[in-house]
Amino acid sequence: MTTADRPPLTKKDFKTDQEVRWCPGCGDYSILNSVQSAFAKLGKQLHETVVISGIGCSSRFPYYMETFGFHTIHGRAPAIATGVKVSNPALDVWVVTGDGDAMSIGGNHLIHALRRNVGLRILMFNNRIYGLTKGQYSPTSPQGKVTKSSPLGSIDQPFAPLALALGASSTFVARSIDIMGPHLEGTVMKADEHDGTAFVEIYQNCNIFNDGAFKGFTDKEVRSERVMELQHGEPLLFGANKDKGIRFDAGFRPEIVTGDELGTAYVWDETAESIAPAMALATMNEAEFPVPIGVFRRAAKPRFEAGINDQVATAQQNKQESLRDLLYSGEVWTVD
Amino acid sequence: MDTATPSKNDSAKPVQELEQVIIRFAGDSGDGMQLTGDQFTRTTALMGNDIATFPDFPAEIRAPAGTLPGVSAFQLRFSSFDIHTPGDAPDVLVAMNPAALKAHIGELKKDGVLLLNTASFKANDLKKAKYENDPREDGSLAGFRVIEVDLEARTKEALANSALDNRSKMRCKNMYALGILYWMFHRDMEPTMKAIAAKFAKKPDVVDANLAAMKAGHAYAETTEIFQSAYRVPAAKMRPGTYRNIMGNQGLCLGLVAASKRAGLPLFLGSYPITPASDILHQLSSYKHHGVVTFQAEDEIAAVASAIGASYSGKLGITSTSGPGMALKAEAIGLAVMAELPLVILNVQRAGPSTGMPTKTQQADLLQAMYGRNGESPVCVLAASMPSDAFETAYEAVRIAVKYMIPVIVLSDGYIANGSEPWLLPDVDALPAIDVQFAPETSADTKFMPYERNQETLARPWARPGTKGLVHRIGGLEKRDVTGNIDYAPENHQHMIDTRQQKVQNIAKDLPPTETIGERAGDLLVLGWGSTRGAITASVQKLQADGHKVSAAFLRYLNPLPNDLEDLMRGFKKVVLPEMNKGQLAMMLRSRYLIDVVSYSQVNGQPFKSHDVLAYLEQTLAAMKEGN
Ligand code: SF4
């Protein structure tokens, strides 16, 4: 990837001179670190990369990336990024968003970017809370969540973001966790390789307003039992000794298998045509089952920006018309 | 009225010469009235008349047939002299059914010609139009020259040999009516024959039937005794040059494409369907061969947001909409103000508030364009005033947007959008240059300053992603001038607020002098903006001919206002401003200049009638004379 014209860069090259202003201990720091590291490994060039965000804690991200950056308005980053990518498909366009930004105010733009398959990489930091506005429940907060705006517990049913993405025909759907640096970095790199919209949900701890939201499965002591890493072509196994597995019954309900039945664990195919297995994992009850991370779905579909620009290029090839001919077309008449 | 020589189609009946005629076609939305009007318009334009049109669509796409809400009308006025409006009361009304008659008879001139399609005057038709008695029999049509033709029976006869089914044959009855009018007004059938042949190229039966119906109508008028004579309106004396007929939305599209080409900036339109602006999306999507990208977004916000993304990437970002869409776009337009990116926003205004009357016209979004965003968020605001003015206005919007790195809102309205008139085509080579300079590549060790401004315009550099050495961050947060770093310092915010305002104000240095119709001083100045221009021009010209010291001026530039406007207004004893709103520009001018601008307001979903404007101005002059 690197040539004299495109020198190799280090993680440090992707840092800006701006002071990072997230709360100390916020999960965003480790995400920033993993992304910068992945970008360096991917041989990215500063000027070819654009990071576009909406509003929220996560959306401060562009200020800390020494690339082109556009910190836009609440929820609209996918729409602005679509305009950027369509206008210059050569650019490497990343959208950084949060659960409030992407799932609530910007839900419409997100699902339409996904269904169109615009070549954007969308990183959604999911902390299951509104951080920047100081702690209201978000569309991914669990039911019953007590927050400043839900003193008796929230009544809302939360979204399963990956199920939403799958339902919107997203061609790349993955999940990772802020504190699992190497996995996160690897997932970012896989998203980068994908041809089309890549949607990555990143569980991110907001240590101020929702501390420990993911502790139940991310804590070192329980992680191997509670987190299941998806491996393409491998059975769905988890546990410190990989002695437990997941299979699906005829109704695509997940079941945990152990012992003699371990061999019946479902063999994961991230490129499967049916979204049913991915949907089953994306909606699996977090309390009962391990939390899957990794690539849920990867599908090949034409990219939106290619289609839209191809139509223009073909039209330009098929019809040449001067500006004068355009204006003077139709029925014209001359007065002497 | 002179009797002229017989027409070239060898009419045996005499031909009378008229200076102007106003025709209104009215029928069910399924009767093809817009198409009929459009054909008459094209033919008449080609024959060298000046012409102005006003289509009046029903609110529903398909209201129940034969009912009042389903009536669709198309008015056109053509003349042998320069005209500015489609006229007020028609000389000829074509009513395809009782509902059309009921909706429009009130405006037909006394002695006017009323062409009635008797085929649809059965009891049930009358009931649907809520007529208790047949108006043809109760004396209510006395005073009009009524011509009754059973268009269905006549069309059926004419198409006896056609292979089409009965339903399709009946669709040709509007062509039969058009044939009658072509004979009456001595129009050439040739252009319509060509147009129909082209339109239905793949359906020869349909072409044949339409043409047969039109010719039969023509022959019917020629031979029957009900018409005493045909009329002719000689060609108008128009400025030399090449013309085409143009509608406002078309003019905007062509202006944008022309500007895109001259600037070397590929055009990106982000848009969401909305009446009456959708035709802009349709038309631009057919200009792909001019490098135009159209993106039909998921909503109004995504439409403007994608256009901002396009501008950020170095394309010409445009979005088109109407009032409700403007409300949704407000926050994003504020972002473009903050990020100082060029953006053109077309608002084809319609009657509000809320959903209002989507197919009716109004110009009540001016204050929304000016102030309808949070914070101090100044943008440039321009207004198109006629279909033939739309091209230049759109072109100018692009020039300003890229020169000053600023959003420009272009206000049009439903009346301009769908009305048509002859447009003197511009000399393409003489179009003003639009000079675009992108920030150049720099070496990695110089830090790029995204808000380092051009000292003359205060524009910041247009730094396209992908350009080496230009990495920088922008966004909606307040930023320090020059560096673009986030900055909440009081003195910086004040400075940036003032700078964004000054940048808009600087545009005024660039503007041509405000033109007037008449002297630059006198008793009464009638100001206008947008589509009131036609009615004002007609009224003021009449008053001038009557010897009054009245002038008119029309403002394309609403923000900033032209620097010469204040002096111009002070040269008159009184300033009157007709607007299709509750006095929005009048309020702006009064507060800005402390001049007692008098608002003449009409907000009924219809354009001003020139006789109403004239009557108001006459009253005003009379009152001034009495010293009131
Ligand atoms: S409020 Fe929460 S999410 Fe926001 S910066 Fe602080 S810790 Fe991070």
Image (cartoon, coloured by chain):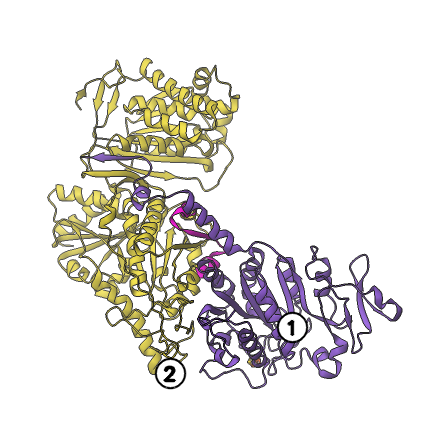
Chain colours: A purple, B yellow
Residue at image coords 50%, 81% = A12
**Is A208 on the left-hand or right-hand side of B74?**
right
Quick check: B398 above or below B340?
Answer: above
Whether B358 is drawn above or below B227: the answer is below
Query: Which x, y percent locates residue B473?
Result: 43, 74
The spot of residue A34 in percent (x, y) is 58, 77
Chain hosting mark 2: B
Task: Please indicate, yes or no, whether residue A214 appears anywhere in the rendered image.
Answer: yes
Q: Residues within 10 Å of mark 2 (few under 14, many from 20)?
A: few
- Quadrant assignment, res A255: bottom right
Pointer 2 residue Cβ closer than 8 Å to ligand 1 = no
Q: Quadrant of residue B556?
A: bottom left
Q: The residue under label 1 is which amino acid type?
A: Ser
* Rendering coords of residue A115 (x, y %): 58, 56
Q: Are marks 2 and 1 in contact (CB under 8 Å)?
A: no
Count all numbered tags in the image, as a single digit.
2
Q: Which residue is mark 1?
A: A176
> Relative to the observer, which residue lies in front, B447 or B248?
B447
Q: Secondary structure at mark 1?
A: strand
Q: Is residue B303 magenta?
A: yes
The quadrant of the rendered image in which ligand 1 is seen is bottom right
Magenta stretch, residue numbers = B283-306
C-alpha span from label 2 to label 1: 38 Å
x then y, percent, for residue B355: 46, 51
Reading the image, the residue beneath label 2 is B489
Label 2 residue SS: loop
Q: Nearer the viewer, residue A186 or A81?
A: A186
Q: Kindly identify which chain the residue marked by label 1 belongs to.
A: A
At label 2, which amino acid type do we have?
A: Ala
